[in-house]
Image (cartoon, grey):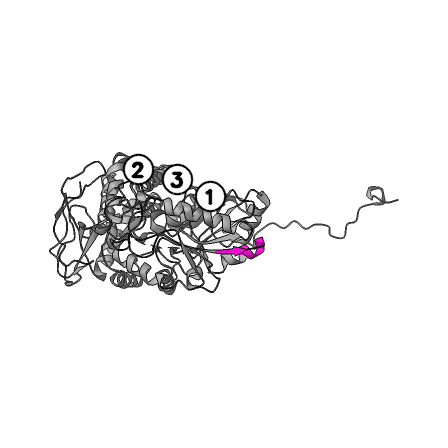
Amino acid sequence: MLLVLGAAPHTVYGDGTGCATAHTERPNTPAEMGCPVEATQCGSVIGSIDSTRQATSEEGYGQYLSRNPAELDDVVARVRLDGPDALVSAARQARRAQREWAKVPAPVRGRVVSGFGRLVESNKEALASLVTREIGKPYTEALGEVQEIIDTCDYFVGEGRRLYGQTVPSEMPDKQLFTFRAPVGVAAVVTAGNFPVAVPSWYLAPALVCGNAVVWKPAEYAAATARALAELAWRAGVPEGVLNLVYAEGEATFEGLSTALREGVVDKVGFTGSSRVGREIGELCGRHLQTPCLELGGKNPMVVAADADLDLAVEGALFSGWGTAGQRCTSLGNLIVHRDVHDEFVRRLDHALREATIGNPTQDVLYGPMLDRKFADRFEQALAETAPHHRVLGSESTGQITDSNPRKGFRGDHSTGLYYHPMLVDGVRADDFLFGNEVFGPIVGVTTFETLDEAVELGNLPGYGLSAAVYTTDPGTAFRFREGINAGMVSANNSTSGAEAHLPFGGNGESGNGSRLSGMWVIDQFTRWQSLNWDFSGRLQKAQMDVGAVEPELDYRLPTELRGHR
């Protein structure tokens, strides 16, 4: 159960006028129909979970109402927003706590992460229901997201016993060389809300196993979900001050990061969000000689070759293009279809999209609402980018689903939330806005190609490099596509979306700075290599100078009897 936290509101953000009741007649879980649900009061938690941050010297940062996007009258959380000093205070607290946490043996830290995973598993349905309620993700997808945390924790339990260094031979006698992984220190982690629990776990589990302390700033529109996840981590045994939760808006977060970096109380920044903000964070960290872990946006291509299994390709496109209403960083952006199969593929995909069920995320639907009002507003702006040369398919209409603009087969009550028609836009050209820019919503563009080289060039053209897919029955096509595409993650005959806990996750170009989350690769983000040379010779041995030399006889030539010719 979540604790009731936070101070009285000042200014209210998040469309707070007229809908501020604390109780609604909205089910808390798919099974609990008609039960009144209380809005969670969320405030920053710095240091001890028993000493929630209350009044500060800063006033006027206000309150954000995190609303259920499927039922906007349902206020899921009232979030007391803090200013820059909250993040700095949390980093200072983390700095003090991290020194002791790093002394805990890594296998024991792994057991804490194991307990975290087991607690998540015990609360799987409840946590998934909260994800569905707060961000509108279909319940089946939310269950999968929670499973991702469990898988991640299962993996990193073992890393507590596998933080391997190496023993390296010395060039001098009576001397040994070693390498060790040391924690970076304090990690400040800023996450988006479209994957409100899975992506944070990709940061939290390895950071904690490696001996770091964490300051976590989640998205305001996923505040209750973040608090629930942090609560489970604390209950698993994460010590006081090692995991701190800060609620703040973007500008205050950036200012707090800047101060904390300048003060030297943050050693690593992890950021999941837009490419624009990621670039700013990269510049900020660079001024302090730090390399952040940046997981940014994508304009992910799917190439459908002439020999592709079209039904399979349609299935993959449907899930990756419109699942979660297209609000994943790995969502399909551009379909690049061979001219020979273009018409048939588009016909099948149009039919599948028109038949797909959209609606209340507690039910069996392809997708539910937009995550938050701000994403709905941005999506509507992008709709204006359709041009006369585009053919819009996939639904009877475009824009928000309303009484005057209905969607056939809609499941639930469209009037309560932020529901939008799916769009399949055929005839997209390489110089179109819709081709080159990430559009966070249920829209996918289609263009054509003739040669694989052309398809690869089109896939790379927007400048992102997160995820890409190719559908083909020819292994040569799949491998040549992999060689040419710039994406950090490539799928053959699978969708652009989907990650496994033991594979590296991340992108290149506009999608990131080459850092990777998940698997053994993320360990490099949360540790630094330290070497030790141990000389037990009893005298000073100087490398490169006191090394015994063995000189070859370079003027030697094989005798006649050992030569191959007569």
**Where residue 443 sits: x, y (%)?**
38, 54
Q: Residue at x 34, y 43 (%)?
A: 209
Whole-percent x, y for residue 214 in the image: 29, 50
Q: Whole-Å distance between the Cαs marked 3 and 2?
A: 14 Å
Image coords of residue 192 (percent x, y): 31, 53
Mark 3, secondary structure of its residue: helix
Is tag 1's residue or tag 2's residue first in the polypeptide sequence?
A: 2
Crowd band around label 2 with a 10 angstrom C-alpha radius: few (<14), some (14–19), many (20+): many
- Residue type beneath disc 2: Gly
Q: CA distance from mark 1 to mark 2?
A: 28 Å
Which of the two marks, 1 or 2, is nearer to us in this view? 1
* The quadrant where residue 125 appears: top left
The crowding category of the residue bearing disc 3, from other C-alpha atoms within 10 Å (few below 14, some 14 to 19, many at least 20), is many
Q: Is residue 495 visible?
A: no
Question: In terms of depth relative to the viewer, which is nearer, 299 or 390?
Answer: 390
Label 1 Cα crowd, 10 Å radius (few <14 / some 14-19 / many 20+):
some
Judging by the rendered image, the residue that carries numbered circle 2 is 117
> Which residue corresponds to mark 3?
159
Instruction: Please state the extent of the stretch shown in magenta in the rendering.
Output: 447-456
Check disc 2 and report its element: helix, strand or loop. helix
In the image, taking residue 441 as reference, residue 7 lies left or right, namely left
Q: Residue furthest right?
A: 566
Q: Amino acid at mark 1?
A: Asn
Q: Nearer the viewer, mark 1 or mark 3?
A: 1
Residue highlighted by disc 1: 494
Q: Is residue 337 visible to the viewer in this orientation of the structure?
A: yes
Say what secondary structure mark 1 lies in: loop
User: Left or right of 293: which side holds 134?
Assistant: left
**Earlier-in-chain disc, 3 versus 2:** 2
Distance between the alpha carbons at the discs numbered 1 and 3: 29 Å
